[in-house]
Image (cartoon, helix red, strand yellow):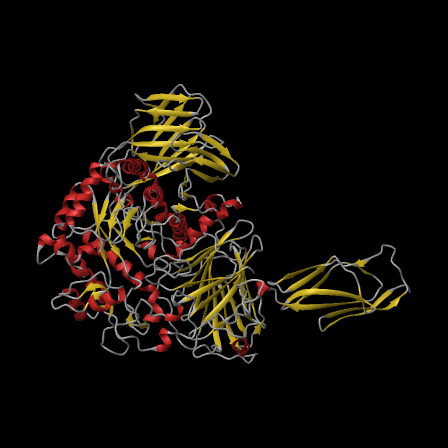
Amino acid sequence: TLAIQYNNFIVSQNTLQLNVTNNNYSDPNNLMFQEIKILGLQQELMTVTVLQENAVQVSSHNITYNPTDKFAVISGLQLDLGKSYSLTWTLGTRATEKFDCYPSAGVSKELCEQRGCIWAEDTSSSNVPYCYYGSDNSYSISDVQYTASGLVANLTYANTTARAFERSTSPISTLRLEVIYHSNDMLQFKIYDYANKRYEVPVPLNLPSTPTSTIEQRLYDVTVQTKPFGIQVRRRSTGTVLWDSQLPTFTFSDMFIQISTRLASQYVYGFGETEHTTYRQDLNWHTWGMFTRDQPPGYKLNSYGFQPFYMGLEEDGNAHGVLLLNSNGMDVTFQPTPALTYRTIGGILDFYMVLGPTPESVVQEYTALIGRPVLPPYWALGFQLCRYGYANDEEVAQLVEEMKAARIPYDVQYTDIDYMERQLDFTLSPEFAGLPDLVNKIREEGMRFIIILDPAISGNETNYLAFDRGVQNDVFIKWPNSNEIIYGKVWPDYPNVTVNNSLDWDTQVELYRAYTAFPDFFRNSTTEWWATEIMEVYDNPRNASLSLKFDGIWIDMNEPSSFVHGAVWGCRDSELNNPPYMPTLGWREEGLAYKTLCMEGEQQLPDGTLVRHYDVHNLYGWSQTKPTFDILRNITKERGIVVTRSTYPSSGKWSGHWLGDNTAAWDQLEKSIIGMMEFSLFGISYTGADICGFFSDSEYELCLRWMQLGAFYPYSRNHNGEGSKRQDPVSWNSTFEDISRDVLNIRYSLLPYLYTLMYQANAHGSTVVRPLLHEFVEDRTTWDIQKQFLWGPALLISPVLQQGAVTVNAYFPNAIWYDYHTNESFGSKGEFRNLSAPLDHINLHIRGGHILVQQSPANTTAYSRKNPLSIIVALNDSQLAEGQLYWDDGVRIDAYEDGVYLLTSFTARQNTLEIKILHRGYSDPNNLKFTTVKTLGLKTTVTRLAVLENGIEIPSAHSLSYNATTQVLSTTQLELELGKEYTLQWS
């Protein structure tokens, strides 16, 4: 018998022995072992050494390790068949695979090793954790029960290492896992303590009453790894792993819950609210805290809102989104693995994943879950002016007249807290005694007025109905097990004091600011009280001449903000205010009560359940928003708009959001684009930053460029702070006025298109401010574009963002693009272009394949809505284009839901433009007509245009001109009635 007998392949102690025991055959093909795969490796294969007769052999092999499936492949070996070898290897942890075992401040080798973790100082990168996990997580899975719509299993903790745990962080020994396949593109996985009821977020989601997914149609597959515990979610069509939590970090205790997942790529967007310098998250060891706080935008500083949602791109351009429905203090750490670690200090883990697969469909599916963005009234898309520091109503009246004289479009005027007496909600300062008449006057002229309200109510007044009725109705947050109100300090001043503004801030707070109580907006009684107080501002029952006929409400300071930390006399529960794990927040060492209420404050959900402020702090603004929205509509009988500072997932159903107290600085322009794009992901369409900056004096060029950019914020408001110089458009010079007027006239012309985008967001969950990657995800360059943005699919905005710049280096993805100003076109396969951008110019481009409706502008939307309409047809390479127009009366509540609207579609193909009515539920009283159609990119000369109705040509006294050089066909003097169907044929 001729044979080679390998008696054994022995693996032990990180060694593989290939022992030949019989060799009397030589294969003529010189066969070799070239690849060895090792399964079940819990650590990475770092090095491999090949030995023959104990002598190290030269080997140019490669090692790859798959951390998800825990196997290594050694390729490129040349081990001759018939020879004995031994392979030895070392296992280890690459820097990118190190998960931080001691995220708290003050880590040391001793503390690290007490936790059973590994200490290794790594100076190669400043951010690699020195203390990292060396073993698996200690949870395993048992009793898995599969159903057609998911699975249920138990998690059991086995303390395999002698780890030391701080107070309230000992792992809970038995947990429950539930996975629910709600729909083909959305699943939920939830981990909770089934033996002891824990706080869960009381925010309702739109979930099917019974799961609707089918095994054949699901876009995902879920695997539960038993020991160590992990969940893996794959995209079925590609096999890409979207979620993989079989990592050492998982722990679940009363006050510290941690879970990590590998990410599908380095391309992750979202999490807020924090000022980010890039739209795409930097995965190089960055931690971001989330905890709502009165914190102006700043690097790594947790700010007003709480948005635990991200969108991930996969390497092939597919996209998915993940929400962690948890409202406790939290931080998230990104590392270049790529991986993400969540740490939260309460509640449960309740994840929802949507599968896209496009970025735009991720947002549509996410807003289907949390609620679609609100449809603002038409007037709220007009330009708006506000200032903290108006001296009196005469100053506001003067501003209105100056804006009218300059013919600058402008719809909405505000007053900040100056209009109140000593900053007390629901009062009117003697300096603003003329404000009610002024509001009535500007409303008669077609403008609108928005008031500000803060939640904190002064408790130091003798006859202050808002406080007295609040006490009577038991609306204020109290100390636990007590009838005692928790008092902070915010804006209201004591009665009978003269404020000395030259004193430092803390001294002013101590000497002049009144004690304030904080309404608990979860309580039903609070909603009723809030409604009464707001109604009496609108219709003052004691003095009708003081009634303020507002159209919208701006709710500020609702994180909630306090000017003392916790309470006037300090907090009483040390553990809740300084928890065992303090998330990575700004002023981390100050504890959770910094600039807000004590965490032990007791609140009451509508069903009577008592909850700690510790658990619902991040829901305070959310809980105030819907009641305010409902009250506004009930009072004004119109749609109105609420703008809130603090947000949580689903806030966009009821409100818009401005990006907070920014600074008059050039870097804020780009950051505002990033902020708006993030809030597009979060389901809040009506967003914008304070144009020209809130803090500090703006300067001419900055403010002018900001007016140009801000003309394309959905929420377009110029607003600045007390003590800074005026920055409204009529406070500079006539050139500034001219440029402001021109760019706002463009905005007002495009409002029918913007309003249609707002409808599409409200009806279908589409984005309004749209990152380029949402339309061109196949072009990886767009994955990092953050200096430009789209309105919907069709209008590209490329603003100047740098001081002194008179050009813009703008990216144009694969399409035909038309200059909005000149109609000039060019085709791009994906390229940067240097565009001229003198001081009076913002670059705007229309994308081929789309149709936009415009309307002649006017000083307010009340008048522009009566003006003639026009159509821009921007043809693509195939000479096709399409678009829509949504139209209603602009103010009716639930116009879309009740079907009281007109939806028109426009389709251009070959030599025709079809105007079709998709829904006819509204007839405009102004007899609006399309009088102009401009067709861009028309390649054939046109000498005649026929207008057809019901297939029959009708008389039309229009005028036609075709420019063969620019390929533009202009048709004017048309009389196409809005609400009728037409076909335009050119030849």
Q: Nearer the viewer, residue 739 or 880?
A: 739
Q: Is residue 185 visible?
A: no
Residue at the (20%, 40%) spot, across then down: 402
Q: Is residue 453 above or below residue 699?
A: below
- In x, y percent, where is residue 139? 53, 74
Q: Nearer the viewer, residue 962 or 646?
A: 646
Q: Give the quarter of the figure containing the N terminus.
A: bottom right
The quadrant in which the C terminus is found is: top left
Asked if residue 514 is positioned above or below residue 281 in the image, the reply reads: below
The percent coordinates of residue 142 (x first, y second) are 54, 74
Q: Position of residue 773 (x, y in %)?
A: 48, 46
Q: Is residue 861 above or below residue 315?
A: above
| Left or right, residue 106 beside residue 74 | left
Q: Position of residue 530 (x, y in %)?
A: 21, 62
Q: Nearer the viewer, residue 725 or 503?
A: 503
The single residue placed furthest to the front in the displayed view is 502
Q: Quadrant of residue 645?
A: bottom left
Tell me what residue is drawn at x 20 percent, y 54 percent.
Answer: 634
Name, please, the residue furthest toward the top.
943
* Camera sees residue 667: yes
Residue 175, above or below 654: below
On screen, residue 513 versus residue 260, left or right, reads left
Question: Which of the two residues, 876 or 181, is positioned nearer the viewer here?
Answer: 876
